[in-house]
């Protein structure tokens, strides 16, 4: 009997092609589109924001001759992803909701649905690969999404199918055309966070926390010596390394180097204050057996950042500290720290803080 | 996989062959516009008038009290908005309804509220029946219209329509009932029960989608929703869907003629299914089971530790079509507003599966569902594997 796979389908080209490839490979494919949010809060029964995407996914499944379901994961997504997103910004951090969506929504909640329909496998359109139960980077380095997958439960890796992870985006589009999926073949991909479609994350913060949320209230720009050099209209509008929207009149380019939510302060400074020599991350999750303290790994501190060499100097339950061989710019609390060995993803965690290049690193 | 089983008759039903046969000439040679004065027009007009008379007879109504609509939703909107807009300026600005109504009624009431109406929702019992005293206290001499559905579409409870209609009348309020699920399941007689407005729909009784009717008792003033021509006395302008009205008339006659026998058959099958589920899953919750009167064709069941979505998918992949809650436009399942109003816990509400029986339901299909559903429950609860 054919093995069943539940494919998470967003209506985009990658997951559509993933489903089509799995049909070709002989799997018993069941498509599912997750309904994750609804913007029209006061009219819950109105068409949902993602209706067109749902329709695209449904049409792809129709043309593949496989069943398609829409799953309402709105309340869990709101709790696990959106609430956290808002909470992180309120604490002066810069979250990546996609990580939590993968960890909790796709590879936990959706997996429960897969179990319910006796699906052996769960598949997505991620550009990443699993090799013998180990997560690897996608072959197309420009599209690699392994950075967003560090949080999933290790045991799930052996049930994951990531069919597009072994090809380039160009190849994925070619497959879409070859299989006649013209509906989605040339869809552009969105860089936006799905529940923040117009790119303005402050709207959702305001929606959840109210107009008078401290994260969106006026506060000072200060230098690291404490002197005030201007004022801003909400620290949630800033992230570490940002240059846009800062006061002018300095001899060298200035960057956001720290955010202090308690005094609503955005600290700015020259590039050297942005450099970090060490990083501490929490909520660490391993996708392989945890390496020992003293191991050398390659780390990535944001999506698309170049990998950097580092040494694990401390592991303390779910907290880890690494020392970087060379200073790295803009280590940002709330972003993910992902550890690699070549293409293999070892694990990751949430960046708690970076440590200034100028300060000595204390070993445990 | 064995033959698929359709257990979603409350959503829609297949068009009956007799109905299709009756309609076909109107997609062929008898294509005229009933408003035309020539022979084609006269022919269509005759057929339309007859259809109206036939539907009226099925409801104990006069032909001029029947207004054809595109279906139940339009009928509900005409009733609620039409009555409120006609009466609001007479000092009757309130609308009374229940929280377990179909969204077609609730949506129309919310729209009226946006336009200034005073919206009042009466209480319902834990078995999904409108509380008489609550209803009586809300319907007053400021009430334009009260609207209570005859049979709840999610859980199948039959509401005390005769009594509620009487109560509304005594306050001078109009009384509307959404009879979409009731038509063909209970005796509907406009002469015996004093409702002023009644909604019915074709596709729940073997007529095509896109046809329904609203009964408007003589002397009841309703503002039309549409404006344009003079069709249907101006109550519902627009060229009539002649073929569909013929189909609706035929389906209505068949439903009324077969009602008692079919109700007995469905009741027996529903009870058989209910007993089988309770025998194998003793803690299954059958919503509305404690109501004094239940429709014969709806069984809404929840089992703690399961969820509607997973169960619906698993059932569908085994060839059994059911539904849950009310579907959102995207097709996903939303928590049921009906169960919420009955005070059902979120855990139990999110496990609800509606099985609705009808013309396609046989003993064999019930036996199969009585087998598969409890097995899926057991699996969801981590008890045993399922074959099939």
Image: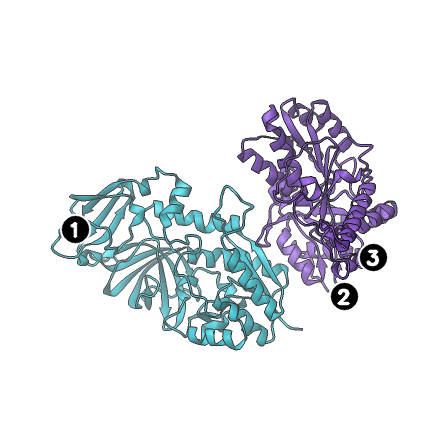
Chain colours: A cyan, B purple
- Provide the chain ID for the residue under circle 1: A
The quadrant of the rendering that contains the N terminus of chain B is bottom right
- The answer to whether marks 3 and 2 mark residues whose Cβ atoms lie closer than 8 Å is no
- The image shows residue B21 at horizontal and vertical percentages of 81, 59
Q: How many marks?
A: 3
Residue A120 in view, yes or no:
no
Residue B17 placement: quadrant: bottom right
- The image shows residue B313 at horizontal and vertical percentages of 64, 58
Residue on which the image places disc 2 = B2
Q: Compare residues A164 and B211 and report the one nearer the observer.
A: B211
B4 lies left or right of B112: right
Q: Residues within 10 Å of mark 3 (few under 14, many from 20)?
A: some
What distance separates the C-alpha of mark 3 from that of mark 2? 28 Å
First in sequence: mark 3 vs mark 2:
2
Q: Residues within 10 Å of mark 1 (few under 14, many from 20)?
A: few
- The image shows residue B373 at horizontal and vertical percentages of 72, 55
Residue on which the image places disc 1 = A248
Residue lying at 28% horizontally and 41% vertically, measured from the top left: A262
Q: Residues within 10 Å of mark 2 (few under 14, many from 20)?
A: few
The numbered disc on residue B18 is 3
């Amino acid at each position: 009997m054919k093995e069943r796979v539940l494919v998470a389908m967003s209506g985009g080209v990658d997951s559509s092609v993933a489903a089509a490839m799995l049909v070709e490979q002989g799997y018993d494919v069941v498509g599912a589109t997750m309904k994750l949010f609804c913007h029209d809060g006061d009219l819950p029964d109105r068409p949902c924001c993602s209706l067109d995407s749902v329709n695209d996914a449904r049409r792809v499944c129709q043309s593949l001759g496989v069943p398609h379901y829409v799953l309402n994961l709105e309340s869990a997504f709101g709790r696990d992803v959106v609430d956290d997103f808002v909470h992180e910004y309120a604490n002066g951090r810069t979250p990546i909701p996609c990580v939590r969506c993968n960890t909790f929504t796709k590879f936990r909640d959706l997996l429960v649905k897969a179990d319910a329909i006796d699906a052996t496998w769960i598949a997505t359109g991620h550009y990443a690969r699993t090799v013998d139960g180990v997560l690897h980077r996608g072959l197309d380095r420009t599209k690699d999404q392994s950075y967003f997958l560090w949080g999933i439960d290790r045991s799930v890796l052996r049930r994951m199918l990531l069919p597009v992870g072994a090809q380039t985006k160009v190849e994925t589009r070619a497959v879409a055309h070859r299989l006649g999926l013209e509906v989605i073949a040339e869809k552009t991909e969105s860089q936006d966070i799905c529940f923040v479609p117009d790119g303005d994350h402050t709207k959702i913060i305001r929606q959840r926390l109210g107009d008078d949320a401290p994260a969106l209230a006026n506060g000072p720009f200060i230098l690291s010596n404490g002197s005030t050099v201007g004022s801003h209209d909400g620290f949630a509008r800033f992230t570490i390394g940002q240059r846009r929207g800062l006061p002018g009149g300095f001899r060298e380019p200035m960057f956001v180097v720290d955010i202090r939510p308690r005094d609503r302060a955005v600290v700015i400074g020259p590039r050297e204050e942005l450099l970090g020599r060490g990083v501490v991350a929490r909520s660490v999750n391993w996708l392989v057996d945890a390496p020992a303290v003293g191991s050398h790994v390659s780390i990535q501190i944001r999506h698309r950042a170049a990998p950097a060499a580092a040494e694990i100097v401390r592991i303390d339950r779910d907290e880890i500290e690494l020392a970087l061989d060379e200073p790295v710019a803009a280590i940002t609390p709330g972003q993910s720290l992902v550890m690699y060995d070549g293409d293999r993803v070892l694990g990751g965690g949430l960046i708690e803080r970076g440590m200034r290049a100028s300060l000595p690193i204390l070993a445990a | 996989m064995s033959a698929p089983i359709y257990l979603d008759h409350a959503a829609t039903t297949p068009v009956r062959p007799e109905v299709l046969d009756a309609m076909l000439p109107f997609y062929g040679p008898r294509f005229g516009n009933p408003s035309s004065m020539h022979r084609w027009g006269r022919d269509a007009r005759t057929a339309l008038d007859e259809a109206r008379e036939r539907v009226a007879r099925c409801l104990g109504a006069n032909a001029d009290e029947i207004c054809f609509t595109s279906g139940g939703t339009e009928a509900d909107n005409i009733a609620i908005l039409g009555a409120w807009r006609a009466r609001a300026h007479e000092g009757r600005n309130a609308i009374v309804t229940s929280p377990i109504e179909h969204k077609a009624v609730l949506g129309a009431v919310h729209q009226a509220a946006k336009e200034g109406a005073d919206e009042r929702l009466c209480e319902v019992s834990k078995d999904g029946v409108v509380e008489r005293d609550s209803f009586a206290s809300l319907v007053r001499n400021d009430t334009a219209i009260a609207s209570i559905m005859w049979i709840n579409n999610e859980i199948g409870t039959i509401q005390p329509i005769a009594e509620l209609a009487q109560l509304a009348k005594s306050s001078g309020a109009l009384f509307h009932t959404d009879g979409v699920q009731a038509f063909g399941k209970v005796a509907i007689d406009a002469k015996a029960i004093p409702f002023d407005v009644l909604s019915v729909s074709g596709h729940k009784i073997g007529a095509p989608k896109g046809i329904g009717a609203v009964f408007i008792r003589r002397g009841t003033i309703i503002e039309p929703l549409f404006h344009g021509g003079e069709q249907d006395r101006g109550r519902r302008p627009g060229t009539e869907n002649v073929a569909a009205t013929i189909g609706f008339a035929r389906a209505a006659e068949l439903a009324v003629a077969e009602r008692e026998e079919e109700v007995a058959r469905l009741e027996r099958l529903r009870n058989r299914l209910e007993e089988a589920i309770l025998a194998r899953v003793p803690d299954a919750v059958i919503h509305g089971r404690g109501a004094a009167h239940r429709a014969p064709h709806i069984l809404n069941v929840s089992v703690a530790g399961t969820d509607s979505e997973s169960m619906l998918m698993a059932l569908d992949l085994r060839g059994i079509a059911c539904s849950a809650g009310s579907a959102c436009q995207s097709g996903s399942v939303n928590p049921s507003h009906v169960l919420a109003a009955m005070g059902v816990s979120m855990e139990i509400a999110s496990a609800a599966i509606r099985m609705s029986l009808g013309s396609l339901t046989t003993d064999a299909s019930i036996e199969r569902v009585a087998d598969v559903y409890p097995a899926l429950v057991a699996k969801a609860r981590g008890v045993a594997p399922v074959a099939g």
